[in-house]
Amino acid sequence: MAFDFLVPVSDKVLAHSELLPQQALGKNIFMHTEKDGLPVFAQADVAIFGVLESRNAFEKKPEKLDLDEVRIQLYKLMMGNWNSTIIDIGDVEEGDSVEDTYFVVKEIVAGLLEENIIPIVIGLTQDITYPTYRAFDKIKDMVNLVSIDSRFDFGEDEELISSHSYMSKIITDKPNNLFNFSNIGYQSYFNAQEEMDLMERLFFDAYRLGEIANNIGLAEPVLRSSDIVSLDLRAIRAAEIGMSKNFSPNGFTGREICAIARYAGISDRVSLFGIYEGENSYQAFQMIAQIIWYFIEGLSFRIKEQPSSKSEDFTKFTVPTDSEELVFYKSHVTERWWVEVPSILAEHTKTNSVALLPCTEEDYLDACNQIIPERWFKAYRKGFN
């Protein structure tokens, strides 16, 4: 069983947790220990685990991320007003081969998903996104993936999977379960024009760093329709993370990335949250800990909503345009917006109801001004291709 390969939380972390106040996370997380073994999965909402695999790193790092220090910074944070039960199941160490590690990660994630537990994966390199994606193979027909990254990570066709090319493997490997890929925070000078053209041809969504930084709310509907969120910490600017060599002077601020993590937690569809490419610095340990905190904070605000004109919780807006009649819904509870996209009916929903695409109020206002929202157009075209 894959869970047998998990290494318990270290004695160093356990000793540190003993000194924490009762309100701290470290006093309220059920941990995998050498003495007691794995915590009980029943009633758990979130499972944290690390992956110590780095052989496919694009940039070889002198030392691996110290997950003990990440845990120490996380455990000292105070609990919010949460109902979530959190477990820490330890770490996956390197297998005999990278494929062995991938297999174990895939099986662990699949096992957690089957128990309706949301995995929070702290991986050394972002190629770990690939086995977490494959974990959905027998669980969900079509999967939406969001990458918070300064790069698209397609790489060259002949390039082996690495932290800069894992998306190529996700797109080409069978079974092809990827319905949509969205990037949040790309920086044009890090991406070849061929990669940008590929994003357009596949009708994938991409939002530039400046676009999101100017209006952080644009990330919310993207994350609301996602199953997997993969965060490359190099999307954060170097000054925020305490590193310089592998980080760029431009990127998200700590406040912005935590807001995005909170949106991911609020999404009632996000089933896995991965954090990758961290390096050893006190600021980096704190940043990872606070990102996890905000994701769990978001979980406490999750509300399952299914827009319907028959529900008093929603208002339906019909907007005639020159080419289409668009139907929007607004929630009175959360003030979130959706738009109907009939073209993705068969491929995406597998039902006889019109598919609903998360959107923003700005999309509705654009439609009122006879401007078809780009996110609607891409979803519409995807349904016919």
Image (spheres, rainbow, N blue to C red):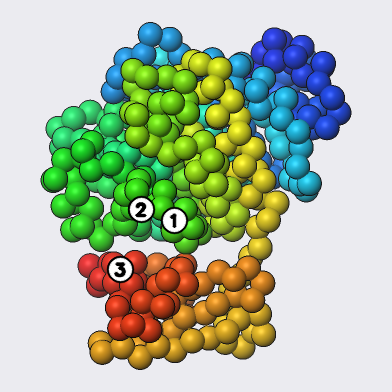
Which residue does the image show at 42% across and 71% down from the upper left?
Answer: 362
Question: Mark 2 or mark 3, which is nearer to you?
Answer: 2
383 over 180 or under it: above or below: below
Q: Is residue 144 left or right of residue 270?
A: left
Element assignment for label 2 = helix
Q: CA distance from mark 3 to mark 1?
A: 16 Å
Q: CA distance from mark 1 to mark 2?
A: 6 Å
Q: Are marks 1 and 2 in contact (CB under 8 Å)?
A: yes
Q: Amino acid at mark 1?
A: Asn
Query: How far across and how far down the image is residue 199, in percent?
Result: 23, 53
Element assignment for label 1 = loop
Query: How far across and how far down the image is residue 331, in percent?
Result: 60, 75
Q: Amino acid at mark 3?
A: Glu
Q: Is tag 3's residue or tag 1's residue first in the polypeptide sequence?
A: 1
Question: Mark 1 highlights which residue?
Answer: 215
Question: Mark 3 highlights which residue?
Answer: 374
- Number of residue marks: 3
The crowding category of the residue bearing disc 1, from other C-alpha atoms within 10 Å (few below 14, some 14 to 19, many at least 20), is few
Question: Mark 2 highlights which residue?
Answer: 211
Element assignment for label 3 = helix
